[in-house]
Image (cartoon, rainbow, N blue to C red):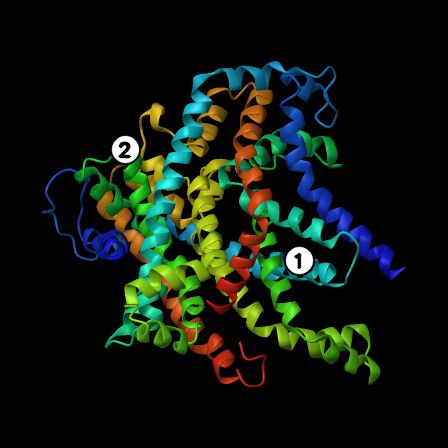
Amino acid sequence: MLYGLLVIAPVLQAMYYSGFKWNGLGDLDDFVGLENFRRAFADDVFTGALWHNGVFVVLSLLAQLPFALSVALMLNARIRGRALLRVLYFAPFVLSEVVTGVVFTLMLQPGGLADGVSPVDREWLADPSIVLYTLFVAISWKYFGFHMILYLAGLQQIPRELEEAAIVDGASGWQVFRHVTLPLLGPTIRISAFLSIIGALQLFDLVWVMTGGGPVNASNTMAIYMVDWGFKRFQFGYASAVAVIMLVISLAFALLYQRYVLRRDIEGALTSMGR
Amino acid sequence: MKRIALYAFALLVALAILVPIAYAVLGGFRTTPQLAADPVGLPDPWVFSNYGEILGSGTFWRQVWNSTLIAVVSTLLTVPLAALAAFVFARFAFPGREVLYAVFTLGLLFPVAVAILPIFIMVRNLGLLDHPLGVALPQAAFGLPLTIVILRPFFASFPNELQDAAAIDGCGPLRFFWQILLPLSRPVLATVAVLALVGSWNAFLLPLVVLTEADNWTLPLGVTNYSTQYTADIARILAFTTLSIVPALAFYAFAERHLVRGLTSGAVKG
């Protein structure tokens, strides 16, 4: 079947290639065992890329998701024009990564819009110490709408009566949020966090367009590193090993997450909204 | 007071969303010296030559055509196949069903990036490099997991009595699928079709690797190439970028409800 042929088979093939030193053209005859994997972890550029993926994961969880949640809460608060705002906030998600990347790159150029607006002139994309954060702003711009929609859907599942009852019992606005809304939103938040982490681990398009992993690898990610070695230097075996590392990390994370975090949702299905 | 803060926040976020888009659209109406002199200003005077030249050139339209062709083909492959598979997963019990289904849901974890090297080699061996199918086929395959995961619960929610009643009237499973299930599922089918179209329209890595010939490029490739080719002419890049998002935004305006509904129902249950 198509799926087996084009999804499963390539993934298995990648695992197979990862054991070889291969340029993608000749015969697969130079078997090197786990050498490619050892080499990846010995390479500072790769471990740096891995670290950057980690930074994006943490930033997403600590900044992007809370932001998306607060926007969703705001739209849920029955303000005027919320239908229009929802459409607007979600729009960047429909734009391609390339478009987002190109427009942000131009805005962030020295002498560009960002310098015109912000009080300090910085080399937003050329300064290794801030490039990750600059990229993160662009990433959030594009993706927060998606998480916002998830949260909105979750919020609409919560019966208003519960929150009203808490208010009647004398709970403050914060208490209602902390002890009623947030726990009931738990399953949605856990799914959204899951998708966000997986996305951050596999980040490619935006970074490729905006910095190409630079300056001097300061914004490299695993996927960038892999494409770089595979399609620029034609070391397919080594690049496959990197792909396999990415896959294993994602998979291990997914299984652990499923086991320890999402399972609570299944066990708690009766008490939490039956989702 | 609280209301005011709420509206201020709403406005601020809206502004943050709009500024980059407005910058691109308006920037296309300016000249690069104008942009350099005052990055924040409005077009003065309005310049139409950037947009005019791009619309008048064959390159842009060819890329629109390539993008459209690939998006349509891959959607036409994904949706029917996924619908059939979801139908089988939803309405028939067979040994190994859940294991097989789990394999599909795991596919959600494989972005094209992980398998891009073998896919490249496979596409090359099939002789499909620089062919629209070389992009559309893998794209369709990678679109299957999400589509199936959204469709299956929907198909499963139809009461068994419906199928039994149809069977008594002499309607086999395939006919039931074709004449009853699919027409009843039109909204969710629209959702997955929109998702597949948008995903394909925006795809970057796969076309980047498969399409080397400039004549075959899709819009995202065109935009990146344009921005490296005319590095100095920011206004032109902005105009090109703006034009490339017009179809996507028009499509979004048209299909917004399907897209949002599909994402919420599919991803939350996922």
- Name the disc covering residue B193, or none: none
Q: Which residue is mark 1?
A: A67
Q: Which residue is mark 2?
A: B131
Residue B173 vs A242, above or below: the answer is: below
Q: Position of residue B255 (x, y in %)?
A: 55, 47
Residue A211 can be seen, yes or no: no
Identify the residue shown where x is 45% and y is 62%.
Answer: B184
Asked whether A96 or A30 is in front, the reply is A96
Q: Position of residue A77 (x, y in %)?
A: 76, 63
- Tell me if A26 is positioned left or right of B7 in this view: left
Amino acid identity at mark 2: His
- Which chain's residue wears label 1? A
- What is the quadrant of residue B185 in the picture? bottom left
Residue A196 vs A142, above or below: the answer is: below
* Helix, strand or loop under label 2: loop
The total number of labels drawn is 2
Identify the residue shown where x is 61% and y is 68%.
Answer: A154
Residue A275 vs B32, above or below: the answer is: below
Q: Are marks 2 and 1 on the same chain?
A: no
Quarter of the image containing the N terminus of chain A?
Answer: bottom left
- Tell me if B236 is positioned left or right of B153 in this view: right
* Helix, strand or loop under label 1: helix
- What is the quadrant of residue A152 in the picture? bottom right
Identify the residue shown where x is 36% and y is 65%.
Answer: B105
Asked whether A101 or A29 is in front, the reply is A101
Cα separation, mark 2 vs mark 1, equals 42 Å
How packed mark 1 is, by other alpha carbons closer than 10 Å (few <14, some 14-19, many 20 or more), is some
